[in-house]
Image (tube, coloured by chain):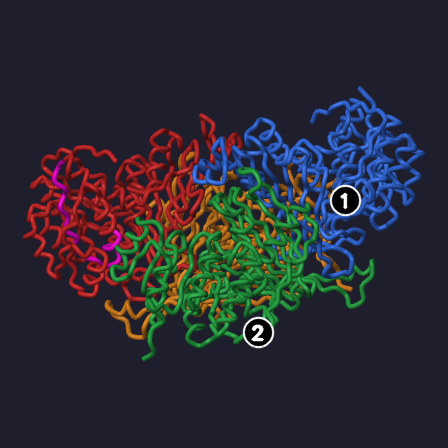
Chain colours: A orange, B red, C green, D blue
Amino acid sequence: MARKIRIGMIGYGYWGPNLTRNFAELAQAELVAVADQDLNRLNSVRTRYPNITLTQDYTDLFKMDLDACVVATPPQTHYTIARDCLEHGLHTLVEKPLTLESKTSFELYKLAHERDLRLMVGHTFLYNSTVRALKDLIDEGEFGNIFYMDAVRVNLGLYQKHCDVMWDLAPHDISIFMYLMGEVPNTVSASGGSFLVPNKHDVAYLSLSFPSGKLAHIHASWINPNKERRITIVGNKKMAVYDDLQTVERIKIFDKGVDAPPYTDTFADFQFSYRYGDVISPYIDFIEPLRVEAQHFVDCIVNHWTPLSDGKNGLDVVRILEAADKSIALGGATVECSQYSLDEEVRVPAAI
Amino acid sequence: MARKIRIGMIGYGYWGPNLTRNFAELAQAELVAVADQDLNRLNSVRTRYPNITLTQDYTDLFKMDLDACVVATPPQTHYTIARDCLEHGLHTLVEKPLTLESKTSFELYKLAHERDLRLMVGHTFLYNSTVRALKDLIDEGEFGNIFYMDAVRVNLGLYQKHCDVMWDLAPHDISIFMYLMGEVPNTVSASGGSFLVPNKHDVAYLSLSFPSGKLAHIHASWINPNKERRITIVGNKKMAVYDDLQTVERIKIFDKGVDAPPYTDTFADFQFSYRYGDVISPYIDFIEPLRVEAQHFVDCIVNHWTPLSDGKNGLDVVRILEAADKSIALGGATVECSQYSLDEEVRVPAAI
Amino acid sequence: MARKIRIGMIGYGYWGPNLTRNFAELAQAELVAVADQDLNRLNSVRTRYPNITLTQDYTDLFKMDLDACVVATPPQTHYTIARDCLEHGLHTLVEKPLTLESKTSFELYKLAHERDLRLMVGHTFLYNSTVRALKDLIDEGEFGNIFYMDAVRVNLGLYQKHCDVMWDLAPHDISIFMYLMGEVPNTVSASGGSFLVPNKHDVAYLSLSFPSGKLAHIHASWINPNKERRITIVGNKKMAVYDDLQTVERIKIFDKGVDAPPYTDTFADFQFSYRYGDVISPYIDFIEPLRVEAQHFVDCIVNHWTPLSDGKNGLDVVRILEAADKSIALGGATVECSQYSLDEEVRVPAAI
Amino acid sequence: MARKIRIGMIGYGYWGPNLTRNFAELAQAELVAVADQDLNRLNSVRTRYPNITLTQDYTDLFKMDLDACVVATPPQTHYTIARDCLEHGLHTLVEKPLTLESKTSFELYKLAHERDLRLMVGHTFLYNSTVRALKDLIDEGEFGNIFYMDAVRVNLGLYQKHCDVMWDLAPHDISIFMYLMGEVPNTVSASGGSFLVPNKHDVAYLSLSFPSGKLAHIHASWINPNKERRITIVGNKKMAVYDDLQTVERIKIFDKGVDAPPYTDTFADFQFSYRYGDVISPYIDFIEPLRVEAQHFVDCIVNHWTPLSDGKNGLDVVRILEAADKSIALGGATVECSQYSLDEEVRVPAAI
């Protein structure tokens, strides 16, 4: 039997315990050590996993013959720690966002490429059974030609210390949109409001344009009376609503739409026909997304695959957020995302 | 007893029958005549109101010793017909939008001012019991300081022949926002998509900025799987959701919010406290908005009041839509609304 | 072209205007006269239908060469008036419940049979597109073997003057259950509460047993905070919820159930398997039920068909309500429905 | 500082781990030992609580100088094990239902009384913050005079091996109703269906009558397409719906009702007036019910209080279920609950 992938966890805050639990339960992985600056957190690791090595200094992990590290520290530390991991020859899974600047994200992406290491970003929704079911439906042509997608991700709190609501919540929807659309937006127009802390957006609206002409819009808020997590997909054949807060009927597919006449001019509207059909909520066998993500990271290491949410994907999300920041500063003007390219690149598609 | 206000109706299409019914039932008004180019429609008037004069030529109405006209024709005809009415000395109620250009809206507004005639625009939601209840709550300070408002007004269809989704649906939310906020936005940033007919938006997103720093956002769509009519109001003391499709509990007021510490810096976040309290749906004694609107028009004529939705209000909505069109053309860049002003103006506040 | 079916309407109260409108719009029928004791109501008929004969004395209708009468008077008058109509050789549609005693219902049923007249009861839900879609699904075997059905029909008000909540609301569910099940319950157990007026139930619970072993339960209430109109159908293959208050997705069909092992004993439970599948809301092209009902009455007259909700069906509903009354008086004990039978009967199945 | 209450846990199946966790975390208690026949389960205890004594034979617990035992074994074993605990002088908390016969429940109740031991039954909902908030509202007169309560507790599965749906689910609603009403029902009428396993009800309907004239009704089902957990409370002043599946707005209080005229006869109905007012969802600070329950058990031991859900309360629930079984066998006839009484009894009211 093959040697297990030896993994070290850096950061045991909000997401750390969930990542730790999932990696600890993977058959092909061995969780060797956990690093966190906070002693209380380390004690809490000890209670649950008495046999794991604990340290306050993550650089100790580089002496433990590890294969990979998982970085779940605050965003502003991602770049330094992930670079350190890659430079020590470790495959690296970094929580989203990859870094806080496209320049540093690109640097990590390039570094991983040069060292032939797996760099993966924790865009969890790409490993979510519901999102994957939607992706399958889209790829099977169920929706026909996609027109646009709309995301609402709002709630009351939790304010993040080191980033605004856009950097906190929008990465989820941006990664979902790119995955479902199968393309990367090239321009962004955004607006936002800072109501509780000066210069820190607690509400943001982003409009993304894709090369194919498709649109996507995101409403993110930390100050909204209800919690909502909803994505609407509008195609010319069918439409769907994905409500992530539902425990049942999480996706509803509407067999309805508007059929424009083949030849359209400004007087053609009256020939429009509206289709109304069944509404279907497909049954989805839901698996914990973090489990799928953890398994995928290990599979990519073992099989030398390119992760679905690889460094390039992480860079794309950061490029878009960076452009959105610039657009807000410009009062909503359309901003093109920065361009980066590797000299050469070979991507080995992954299976999940 | 005073002479009844003699009213003529121009246009008997989608809204016409509802306006006709409401004016016909007002004690202080007498519906004298209905004009429409379509004979079938006129026949349908005759069946219900056998004693009303009918004509295919609206200029016939100018010979009938009327006091006022109601213009419910397609938007592109509003300017010409309303001007004609005002020039014939008639008080005029025009369906929204007032006209399709701020220039012509201003002209009507000015004309009515010069002739001392009531010019009113059919921004129905200002006469909606639920919106008025929200206005009262806001004015009583129930929500504290308002941060922002968000409107979603989406459904499948109905495509309008002569305007896009923004000119069709957004006037409702713009007029509601101005009414609730008590101020007029000065800049707009907007984006939109034209998926079924080239150059005609079927989806639009508008971000409005108000002089006080408040924000408002509108999502309007003709191609959405579900019908939604929802406005969210976020204040520092309370928040509310107004769902116009509910038959009960149309408003929910959430006694919750985030209390920032008095002195805030980037490390202050952890001192944020979240308040969670009761949710209240106040009982609202709902009256048909069109009835209130019709009554208000007659009251303004009788009492020489300035209508709540007067020509200036109609002009404001058109100025904002015009700026939004320009913003979309510029890729979302912030656009200032055009400025117009009358040399002198005396507004007599109205009671409803 | 055939002579139109000449119809007289008796009673113009709550349901009368709706019935009148639907019969007035039928191509094969001619609404000749309306009788009501209340002059105000007759005036309101005149406004809308200036050419219809009006009378305060329903026996005037017997001199007008009519083919049929529609009886929409208060329940306690149904027996006398319907008998009068039948004795005058008129086909008769009576609002539900047919009468207030099984004995008199049987008498009407027998009378119609002897005179070869169509006697139909206004069990509107049998002409409701949603209920008919459920019936089709059941008949196609979509639900497998039906186990039981459960109905909740509750709201606040409206108290009826001449009957209790059970006689007011339960006829709907009883007729729906008999239609969907394809059989007539033989026993009833019921309980009820009289909270506002002594000896007049404002809350009632009925358990119906069918010869096949199927069960059905009805919860009817005039004093409930929310309005609910919901029927649940449980079969061994699929289950459904029909919520009559929804404007969309009125039926939801759940592809789920429990599969018991073929051989079951007290230890077999752990072998139960639960099936979870898609949820489907079939699109239903909804037609006003009263229109279908009115058309059906005329069709049955023209074609000599037995109405779907014929006198026997009306009698069955009354027999069940009568048994339920007896059961409540006995403290819930199971009561068998009274038996009646005609000497001979030929039923000509109807098409809708 | 006082000695901690030394507790032994018997049974580590479905509820056992939750009870164990809560007792383990109580400051005034010490969880000394866990007994279960299943070695795998004991191993799972060891992983989480390495310092607790484990045994497959619960009688070992009687040698450990314990103060109390918690019995969370299958219902059919409750009587024997609880009696054994009481006879060994231990305070005893038994999962619901107390036993499967009123006779044996009475015996335990009497035994605890004679030995002056705390006997408590795990009617968890009496320790549920939402139910307690409702109780407070009722006691404050918020609802006025209560008319009736209605409970729906349905879902698909989970079939219990040793009891039917009524003994599985109805104890919750019976205990809630007795707590909220402040009285014990004296008669029961019930019906049920056995669709998957012969003679084992998977659907049951219970009508409970209280001495004061109040009614309550329970619908329990293991074969229903949707999971529902809903209690409706109808009073003459206000009404409420408690939906236990909601994460927010779990209780809604409706300020509405019907006001009957003081003097009522059959013609008085038209004087009924319907009140419609605000809907309020009070904020509830929710604490895990099992934590409150565990704390209460320990408090009752320490303070010599009578538990809220004491042996008498457990006996009452069993008496009602027994009567319901009898009623189903009799076809729904009203059955009086068996009567038991202690020669003397002193109850010391508890505080929570």
Q: Measured along the vertical axis of the image, is residue A117 above or below residue D235?
A: below
**Residues marked 2 and 1, same chain:** no
Quarter holding residue B159: bottom left
Residue at 56% x, 35% y: name it. Answer: D235
Q: Which residue is mark 2?
A: C345
Q: Chain of mark 1?
A: D
Farthest residue to the bottom: give it: C1
Could you tell me which quadrant the C terminus of chain B lies in? Answer: top left
Q: Measured along the vertical axis of the image, is residue C301 above or below residue D332?
A: below
Q: Position of residue B46 (x, y in %)?
A: 19, 59
Is-magenta flag for residue A289?
A: no
Q: Position of residue A319 (x, y in %)?
A: 44, 53
Q: Chain of mark 2?
A: C
Q: Position of residue B71 (x, y in %)?
A: 17, 52
What is the three-letter code of the residue carrying label 1?
A: Ala
Q: Which residue is mark 1?
A: D323
Could you tell me which quadrant the N terminus of chain B lies in? Answer: top left
Magenta segment = B1-18
Quarter holding residue C89: bottom left
What label sits on residue A319 in the rendered view?
A: none
Is-magenta flag for residue B14?
A: yes
Q: Assess disc 1: are there few (<14), some (14-19) or many (≥20) residues with their C-alpha within 10 Å of its C-alpha.
A: many
Q: Is residue A134 visible?
A: no
